[in-house]
Amino acid sequence: MIDMPRPRLAVCVAAIGLVLAACTAPPPQPAVDPARPNIVFVLVDDMDQGLVRFMPEVQRMQRDGVTFSNSTVTDSLCCPSRASLLSGKYPHNTGVFTNEPPDGGFAVFHRRDERDTLGTQLQQAGYRTGFMGKYLNGYQPGRTLGGERPFVPPGWDEWAVAGNGYDEYDYQLNVNGRVRSHGHRPGDYLTDVLAQRGNDFIRSSAARGMPFFLEVAPFAPHGPFTPAPRHAEEFPGLTAPRTPAFDEPDRSDKPAWLRALPPLPAAKAQAADVKFRKRAQSLLAVDEMLAGFRRTLAETGQAQRTHVIFTSDNGFHLGEHALPEGKQTAFDTDVRVPLIATGPGVPAGRTVPDSVQNIDFRPTFAELAGAPPRPDIDGTGFASLLRGETGTGRNVALVEHHEPRVSQEDPDRQEKPDGIPPTYTAIRTPEGTYVEYVNGEREFYDARTDPFQLTNTYPSLPPERRDELHRVLTGLAACRGEAQCTEAATAP
């Protein structure tokens, strides 16, 4: 037997090692054009700004990116807000003002705007698109709407959407045109199911080498405020904040619908504490979802080319102004929402005070994706604000609200005795909030001196200031298209 020379033996061993490494190492990920970043968009349901402090991953995102301190929804109600986000249009142009027909709900959006949304626009721009969670009120996973399979709206390559998922259990998902039923086992907790599907979408999209857009819309923290079992004992003793607006004692300056409410009953104040705690608990699974998405992006080599954006469809009140619980008002608790963004070119730890609205997401995402601008939509992109540059040219936000009919089928129904505002239109300006009700009543709250909106100063405003506010409001409430709406959304 002849000994093999050592150098040749070393070469052979090295070659074997390379072969073994090639067999065990993960395959290289296809490159994604860095000029076309990915977007992961998480939209929660009914989250007010005060709940951010219970979400450590969202706070980490604030340190890593930008926080928009002046983000306003077009209507503090689920379906109209989401319709505005998908279409880039105000409610007066979508026709979606409530959660149910004839002036709202999925049926109206399906008839008018569903064939032209941020999903269709990004898909046409070459993005792989995914939508998971809550879509629009009235969408039912099993309905075919004239087709052969359960309906999936245009614009979405991956679709996993529930109808009534508010309980987090015992729901159905339409998964790419097939209905899957989930029960009450721990693994059926909806937020966790969405997290797993979202991570799978990120991995599969990265493997394909395509830029992708993913919207994940959990039902949390919407009532009945169901936390994951692992979080059910968190925050012991937590109570709803007792701000100066909580159970506001003197509402003599308020409009009739609010002035007539009794003081907050003790039982409802106690209930507010329980609900606030459960809302905070239910968001912990969402926070873990966000952390998981960011880990998966890092593991797949996509972290440096992906924007992760977090916001809510509307806010929520719990005891403020003697209103037991709900939304739909023009108060900041209801219309001002969290908005935090990270991603390539986004400066760390920055707060942006510029006014943005949910109609602005579609043009922002389109600009990031390199899609052609759409002047027929009402929103304007704020990608420049993400990069730390100048503002959008708008400093007025429009809020439109129709008083909904009382329906037992509406998950956002509020009882009359608990306070439902009549139809109104409102604007938020750098100076404050101005509201016009359909019955002729008016409100103005000075943002500089009255952050809790306790004093309606409209009666003391000079006539010329009243006229200016009315002119801006009526101009915005009738605008159509980016140019016209941008011109109208500038305070004098």
Image: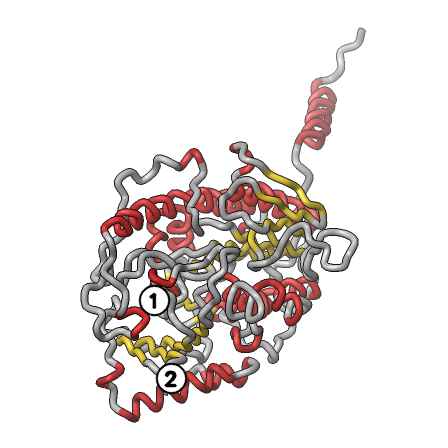
Query: What's the amino acid at mark 1?
Result: Asp
Q: Is residue 159 above or below residue 84?
A: above
Given the current orientation, which residue lies at the most extreme top position? 1
Report, in whole angstroms, how far the alpha carbon at label 2 lies from the one at label 1: 19 Å
Let me know if residue 73 appears in the view.
yes
Camera-nearest label, 2 or 1: 1
Given the current orientation, which residue lies at the most extreme bottom position? 464
Instruction: Find residue 426 and report its image quarter.
Output: bottom left
Residue at the (70%, 65%) spot, across then down: 124
Mark 2 or mark 1, earlier in chain: 1
Q: Nearer the viewer, residue 148 or 36?
A: 148
SS class, disc 1? helix
Residue at the (61%, 65%) spot, across then down: 118
Label at residue 243? none
Residue, disc 2: 491
Q: Position of residue 446 (x, y in %)?
A: 26, 76
Q: Is residue 442 above or below residue 384?
A: below
In the shown orientation, is residue 462 left or right of residue 7? left
Residue at the (54%, 43%) spot, across then down: 195
Label at residue 332? 1
Query: What's the amino acid at mark 2?
Result: Ala
Q: Nearer the viewer, residue 40 or 434?
A: 434
Residue at the (26%, 48%) spot, across then down: 267
Q: Position of residue 30 (x, y in %)?
A: 68, 49
Given the current orientation, which residue lies at the most extreme left position? 250
